[in-house]
Image (tube, rainbow, N blue to C red):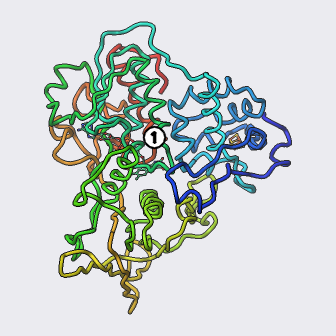
Amino acid sequence: MAKLTGFLEYTRENPPRRPVIERINDWFEVYREFPTDKLQQQAARCMDCGVPFCHTGCPVNNLIPDWNDSAWKGRWHDAIRQLQSTNNFPEFTGRTCPAPCEAACVLGINETPVTIKAIENAIVERGWEQGFIVPEPPRQRTAKRVAIIGSGPAGLAAAQQLNRAGHLVTVIEKHDRIGGLLRYGIPDFKLEKWVVDRRLEQLRAEGVEFQTGVHAGIDFPADELHKHFDAVLLACGAEHPRDIQIPGRELNGIHFAMDYLTQQNKRGAGDAFSPSEEILATGKHVVIIGGGDTGADCLGTAHRQKARSVRQLQIHPMPPETRAEHTPWPLWPVMLRMEPAHEEGGIREWSALTTHFSGDAEGNVCQLHAVRVGPKPHLEPAPRSEFAIDADLVLVAIGFSGPKRDGIVDQLKLDVDARGNVRTGEDYMTSVPGVFSAGDARRGQSLIVWAIAEGRRAAHHLDKYLMGSTALPC
Ligand SMILES: Cc1cc2nc3c(=O)[nH]c(=O)nc-3n(C[C@H](O)[C@H](O)[C@H](O)COP(=O)(O)OP(=O)(O)OC[C@H]3O[C@@H](n4cnc5c(N)ncnc54)[C@H](O)[C@@H]3O)c2cc1C
Ligand code: SF4
């Protein structure tokens, strides 16, 4: 156990955030580094519970009390070894995870939970600084070839595991850069892209091969995949965006959130766009439809682009500020979530259902019309509650429904479930032998930590399929 009386002596603290006025004028990460003494005090709060419920919340089964103990004692090498034994990329989860482990932490019953996520990030950053994280190429090669379609966290985690098992791994990515939503979804102020590049260097040095700008199903037809590779892992994400089919949807200035966020991430990487392609919030009244993570990312991006005003519409009523009674510990709490982007400004509208858009003579959107509604499932409109908001840019951020249609999933003739996600058995193998699937493509839109967990598990089963047995953890 870290420190017997730690949870009595110290209260929860998070790493400091940069002042709003500073951070909305740049694209750097919001959080500052945790000073070592603070970090160790926070690790000391861990009670090393007999039944560590934090494990039940964590999809990768992180050894949380073990590395809290190591962090408290300053044993950074042990801490990083424990952390990397279950999670290939703690620097991604340490920065962006909503931390289901913290929601399940036992200390959360009558106190604030341990700051598990911040400790994870601090450990992995020390691991890099002190040279503990190095390439780990396999000692022997098996001569088996594996194709991984998609370079998001699921594909990358599987690639690292399978390469370390000795297989020749090729990651095929349709975009011009590797990383999936880590690269083109999540904005720099949550995850600076050098963090992704640093990890990719390790994967390259271990022997993973990357092909960018190759669209499996178009540039690389499905039957060619079968000819060139002994097994295939489909980790192509859930890119099919949910749309809002209401009058006025065809007006100029209404875009899917991902088109907007991808463009800003590309701009941040030095790419340029012509005025006709450009989706920018600068000087505009921006309305974001959707109150989730993606919506919050649009909010932070719009502020940094100097929007005139930003509103975020959520169909649900405002949740309570603390854990709702129907989601007691250790369940994932229904409660008001405040992302750093919400601290930066903008107005949140609750119980708001968009009914239609109106535009000007040139076909540009100029207003969004909405009505207040009761809770789901009926969404009963309240009488005389219609309202209109000025809008020059509308961003649709209401989620995704499975992988893109008419693509590689159809070509490979894979079974899909009712939601359009790739159907697999418990062994992550699809309806086609030798073709596996993991991450958002399989479970629907989810979290980075789930993508990493699925990538690792799929790698375990794929290795077993190729070799008859496996030493990869599941
Ligand atoms: C805007 C946004 C913000 C998010 N923020 C967070 C967050 O803060 N924390 C969190 O935990 N989760 C977050 N998520 C969710 C998280 O990013 C995803 O759950 C995770 O990235 C899924 O990983 P994946 O590897 O399954 O797929 P993806 O990351 O989607 O990667 C799939 C890759 O496959 C490629 N691809 C698709 N089809 C083909 C093809 N035919 N040929 C070649 N390549 C192909 C795509 O180009 C993409 O690069 C966010 C999601 C979005 C959209
Ligand atoms: S549940 Fe919380 S206090 Fe208990 S071991 Fe896990 S992190 Fe530590």
Kind of residue at disc 1 = Lys
The picture quadrant where one finds residue 122 is: top right
**Circle 1 — which element?**
helix
- Looking at this rendering, what residue extends furthest in the bottom direction? 384
User: Which of 257 and 98 lies nearest the eye of the viewer?
Assistant: 257
Q: In percent of the image, x 62 and y 63: which residue is there?
A: 323
- In the rendering, at what x and y percent does residue 469 appear? 40, 15
Q: In percent of the image, x 21 and y 77: which residue is there?
A: 247
The picture quadrant where one finds residue 164 is: top left
**Relative vertical location of residue 102 with respect to residue 148 in this rendering, above or below:** below
**Relative vertical location of residue 125 with respect to residue 244 in this rendering, above or below:** above
- Looking at this rendering, what residue extends furthest in the top direction? 140
Ligand 2 falls in quadrant: top right
- In the rendering, at what x and y percent does residue 22 appear? 59, 58
User: Which of 423 and 4 lies nearest the eye of the viewer?
Assistant: 4
The picture quadrant where one finds residue 224 is: top left
Q: What number of labels is visible?
A: 1
- In the rendering, at what x and y percent does residue 53 appear? 64, 43
User: Which of 154 and 387 lies nearest the eye of the viewer?
Assistant: 387
Q: Is residue 335 left or right of residue 400?
A: right
Residue denoted by label 1: 193
Q: Residues within 10 Å of mark 1 (few under 14, many from 20)?
A: many
Q: Is ligand 1 within 8 Å of the beta carbon of the residue shown at mark 1? A: no
Q: Is residue 177 left or right of residue 221?
A: right
Is the N terminus in the top left, top right, bottom left or bottom right quadrant? top right
